[in-house]
Image: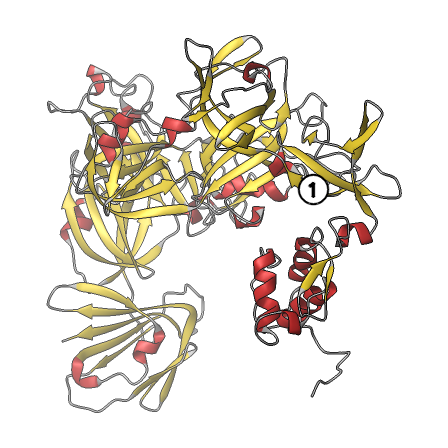
Amino acid sequence: MSIFDPQGNVTYDQAITMVMRALGYTEAGLNGVYPSAFVSKAVGLGALKGLVSGSEDGTRADMAQLIYNVLKQQIGKTGQDDKWDSNGPTDTMLRRLGAVVATKTVDGKEVIDEAVVGKDIKPNDEDTLVDLHDLIGHKVTYYVDRETGKKIVAVEEVKTEEISGKLTQDNKGDYKIGDTKFASDYKGTDPLKANPFLNGVLNKEDFVVKTGVKYTWTVEMKGGRVIDVVSALDWVVNADKKVVAKDLKNLTSDEPSLLNINFALNDDDEMDMNSFVLEGVDKLEDIEEGNIVYVYAADANEDGEDEIVKIQVGNKVVYGVVDEVASNGKPTVDGTTYNLAFADVKGTKTHTIDNKDVTDKLDKAIKAGEMLEWASAGKDSAMFLDYFGKVYAVDNDDTTDAGYAILLKYQEADAKKTIDGSVEKVEVFTAAGEDKIYEVKKGVEVPKLLSLVKIKVNDADKITKFEVCKLDEVKDPSVNKKGIVDNQLLNEKTIVFSYNYTGTKNDEDYEDAPYDAANYSIVKAESLFGKEPDSLSLYTKEDATSVTVAYITGAEAANDDYVFITAYSELANSTYKLTVMENGSVVTYKTKNDDVADNLDPTALVKLTLNADGMISSTKDFAKTDANYVSFDLTTGEAIEFSATEAYVKAGDTYYTLADDVVVYLYDISDKKYTAKDTGFLDGLKVKNFTKVEFYDTIDEKEPVEEFTIVVVTQK
């Protein structure tokens, strides 16, 4: 029994059945029963192209696609013999909706119009109501609305097909495109005079068709041979990149662009979605960081400015061990050999623009030699493929990010600043506050000294890449008390390199001072709050974390803080490096104070005082009083129960208030190591595993407030 439910949703099966019935099909004339009989027929007619059929409710987009797919189907009826018969080739959905095949008059006779898309009919014309971009250069017959005879509403038939290859001509004058031969009695258009489309735009003046050059050709075929050449299409990449987040931000700006090339705008000054072809993804929003993007541009609107006409997106990454790399640079992974992007997309093709031969070359393309260098056999690699499935970029996971650093010296750059040794080396001062020397992998270009760089190293601890960070100098720098300078916020993620030279211009070491790691230190961002350093430069990473690296001179003293000093080592120039636990993290400082290094007690909480260059000038033991320190000895055998929340700790019957930013440490006596924990670690603490629990109040108040900021649990 059928139920009439006018408020219900239409399922895919129901919608398909209605459309098939509109074409004249009935269950009696089909094989099977509802709904499978109608769905099977729809599949056979191509009506479900682009849909996902099922019993769920149909979407508006899919219903529109379903109806569009059958507009050119002939309408018929099922007779008494249960067979469907067409009403004739002129009875279609389109014709009933008021569309007719476009015609033209030739020698006084009306014939069906055969037009070349992009030449005779324009994809961007206001009278073109259907997207024709993927048919550029093709010969088609098409429908127009019956009322005006001008508005193009659909394509009836595509008369040409695409083949790719070089046009050659033998000594008899016979042409061939790749391996495809021309008909022996070929009387079509001279291939060298075919419609020349450069990046989708007919361009007869600048683009000259030549033999021996690979193009995409639209041709009419018969019996496997070419009977006419309609167009030669040359697509030239204007910009290409493995995109980062910043590249995608401009897609949503007031003047949308991609890789510095603008999109065409519609009458509402918004991106004209019908002005370009998108291949590889369904919509622009699907392009992700790390995808390989090719952008093609042309003066499509004859306004003198190139605009995007096609975008190709490669979003596949192949991970695995490289089995081998051939002499031509092609890598084999898991038994599959991959071509390199530069081989066919660019680098092998020459076209003529402005009467000059121009050979394409990918800006970031892989060269065979490079492939052999960084995709050598046996390495785990990530290969980024372009739209054509060819390798555009390779990352080997034997490299790691060594972070930010100041480049101080280079082995071969200047004898005065040379590092001892026979191999190419650099000396850097790192964001970890360390003076380090690295070997440089052969072929890696070393940037200018004193540059702020981000470095990558391989398993052999050799630098494989320098990324120069462009610093923006802040004029007359002044940091307010909230940490804002030059419209940027400095916070706990900010890395601050401080350069401090205490000598004068008359000193012998003045010129070498900027290259001496002893004059550099890492200081807290808070040390700049409310200060006016002598100079300050900023760098902001181009990713979601937006970590700012500040490079300063003349910084004032950093804020005092309480830490546990866990280790130290002696450096050159009577300088010591100290490792401390500070706010739950391992931090390193330098000092020239012998007393600080000599009196190392990892269980003593000390107050650090830093000088202007961020080095420790002095330490002072935490002053334990009844108001700011509480200790529980767990070795006495007395049972003490601990419970905790984020606001307090209860020990026995007594409550102890915790600060908003409390730090909890577990201290291991045997290896003198601190491990940061959360307050939940204190809840239900098992006394038998530990020897001591200590509460420290480090808040500097005139009156004791018993708001504990540090809790240490000592492990047996």
Measured as percent of width and height from the top left, residue 556 is found at: 41, 40
Residue 11 vs 162, above or below: the answer is below
| Residue at (66% x, 56% y) in the render | 65
- The percent position of residue 2, horizontal first and vertical second, equals 71, 85
- Identify whether 387 is placed above or below 356: below
Left or right, 269 with reference to 624: right
Q: Quadrant of residue 442?
A: top left
Percent across and percent down for residue 324 are: 19, 38
> Is 413 or 562 nearer to us in this picture?
413
Report if residue 534 is visible in the image.
Answer: no
Disc 1, SS? strand
Which residue carries the number 1 mark? Answer: 155
Picture layout, residue 31 above or below residue 174 = below
**For the point 15% across and 90% down, which residue is it?**
637
Residue at 75% x, 32% y: name it: 113
Question: In the visual, does 301 lie left or right of 577?
Answer: right
Residue 119 position within the rendered picture, expressed as x and y whole percent measured from the top left: 69, 26
Residue 589 versus residue 331 in the image, above or below:
below
